[in-house]
Amino acid sequence: MRLSELPKGAPAVVDRVHDAHAADPIAQRLRDLGFVDGEPVRVVAIGPMGGDPVLIQIGYTRFALRRAEAARVSVRSEVAA
Amino acid sequence: MSASTLRIALVGNPNCGKTALFNLLTGGRQKVANYAGVTVERKEGRFTAPSGRVLQILDLPGTYSFEANSPDEQITRDVCAGNYPGEAAPDLIICVADATNLRLHLRFVLEVKRLGRPVVLALNMMDTARQRGIVIDVAELQRRLGLPVVETIAVRRGGAKALIERVDGEVPTAAPAQPDDAASRAGLHAQVREILTATVTMPRATAALDDALDRWALHPVFGLLILAVVMFLVFQAVYAAGKPMSDLIGGGFGWLGEHVAALMPAGPLQSLVTNGLFGGIGTVLGFLPVILVLFLFILTLEESGYLPRAAFLLDRLMLSVGLTGRSFIPLLSSFACAIPGIMGTRSIQDPRDRLATILIAPLMTCSARLPVYALLIGAFIPIRYVFGVFNLQGIVLFSLYLVGILGAMAVGWVMKRIRRDKSEHALLMELPSYRMPKLRDVAIGLYERGAIFLKRLTGVILGLTVLMWFISTFPSPPAGATGPAINYSFAGYIGRGLQYIFAPIGFNWQISLALIPAFAARETAVAALATVYLVGGEASGGLGHALAGQISLASALSLLVWFAYAPQCMSTLAVIRRETNSWRNVAISFGYMFGMAYAASFIVYQIARMLT
């Protein structure tokens, strides 16, 4: 499942970040920010217009990601981890 | 060693409290400039350590990673690595990390360490960390990182004492430099996790206060409502405090000019002093209160952590016209005045988004357009009630605001289509913890904005004002001339020349002429029209009456639309030049606004002429 499809409040862990194209700087930045295998994530809020952007809790930090950015991150549910 | 200067670079993630620490270390003794060729601010300060050694501190732009995504991050990377031309490599790097956010910040600390330079880690916001029950084993952290670690509280007096002592002592030995390759980068997160498990106890991942506030601030309904209230208050403050002060300053300089003029013999010199110099200085200083009031709010909102929340709420809306959530506040400020709005785009990190915001900011209906709108609406639009409640004059004024916003949206949309760089630019925005804004940091920020405006723009605006005065005054009218003096000046000739260009949009030569001094500041169009139509005094009632007799309704509507879009403000163009460091952007702004104003006025004039 992609992070952009994760329902609000559902706990999950990051699987990996996918490059949308070769040398994708956004994907690289997501990895630098801590979106790496095994890291717990949660959607804490969604934007008022079209549910975009989404607010992601990762580690001790909250990041606002547009849906296209969140779609680069694949996640799995916590139970499976 | 004691007399030598130590060059220190201050680095850290965004929101680590780095700038507050810089302010605490250097006080107000800062030098703000730009890095050559880019619009990234270079902030440097110095202070003398107890040992007598001078410490020269460079506050580098905040960055998440040396894998740079933007010009400011590239500068941080290159300066730290000693690769930035014209900037000596730092003797010591102070890496600042937020003690409440180590999961994110420690990774960058490890990146900095790999450069192989002497590094000290400042563990900042230790007060907040203690309040939240976060326990950090500093000795163990120091051992595992292999770096000296010092606790700091940037928002407290004396909160950097331990840091100063550490920096003033022996420069720590550098860890050996390590190659920067993808494989070793990928290992950094694992290292961070390991260090955190061994040294940090977090009772909960986020502050309880943040969770509680965000439940309201980011709520789809209440969040937008809160945003609307905040914006309403900001605007009230601008009009209640900033605008009257601006008017007072403008009026004060006018009065001063007249009194100085009374001491001088009549003639061109007297006119230069009254209308050129005092008028010009009044214009420049008149902007200052609005700028300061707006920035007081912008800085407070930014320091408190609310600004990114507002950006979160509005990002989708702004994205649809090719902007970003962060464009919202600068654009909203532009309703008061485009100058602080354009200066406020510094909070937009992405250069493309920033430029797009700067280009459309002047289309927002600023307060200087109001006197022109009020005059023309009062003269041409009858007071009639539509559906019994809506005043027709009010509807026209509202429509003009709407015309500005719709025009800006259209321009944003077109720019999104025609720009060469169509790549996806990320939002990827951290929502930091809420914080009480500190008076010192807001005051230093305000001082910087005010100083930049006065230092860099006074010369340009004053010069242009004097130039406008010159072409409106010379040559003097011939003996026995009956018309107003301006008719015989260069501006008069230019105005008469311009009427051929402006005839298709319904402007006669008097209007064309009035547009020339109005280029200095829109509101002077009213006075200029009064002059050319030989109306004594500035009573707009009399002028409105005179206008209604001489200009057709179609021309008046066309003029209203003209003022909504036209680049009638040279101060704005000067700020665009200053903020983008490019004449090309000034030319683009002027060109597209002129074209857009001309086209819109043409359509309005031709349609109105057919109907009336």
Image (cartoon, helix red, strand yellow):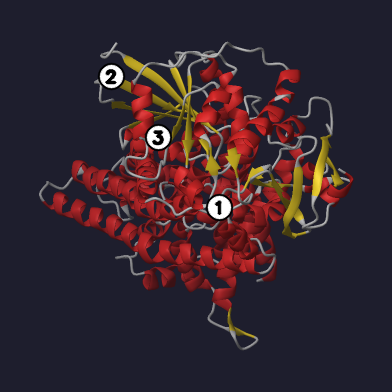
Tell me how far mark 2 sits from mark 3, CA to CA: 18 Å
Q: Chain of mark 1?
A: B
The residue pinned by badge 1 equals: B307
Q: Residue at 79%, 38% (x, y): give it.
A: A38
Three-letter code for the amino acid on which mark 1 is drawn: Leu
The residue pinned by badge 3 equals: B22
Q: Residue at 67%, 16% (x, y): give it.
A: B180
Q: Is residue B346 left or right of residue A1?
A: left
The numbered mark at residue B53 is 2
Q: Position of residue A46 (x, y in %)?
A: 74, 57
Q: Residue at 21%, 57% (x, y): give it.
A: B255
Q: Tell me if mark 3 has few (under 14), some (14-19) or many (20+) residues whose alpha carbon lies within 10 angstroms of its own.
A: many
The answer to whether one can see residue B58 in this image is yes
Q: Quick one: A68 or B524, which is closer to the camera?
A: A68
Q: Secondary structure at mark 3?
A: helix
Q: Chain of mark 3?
A: B
Q: Position of residue B186 (x, y in %)?
A: 74, 25
N-terminal of the pair, mark 2 or mark 3, is 3
Three-letter code for the amino acid on which mark 2 is drawn: Arg
Residue furthest toward the left? B263
Quarter of the rendering occupied by the C terminus of chain B: bottom right
Q: Quick one: B39 or B123, which is closer to the camera?
A: B123
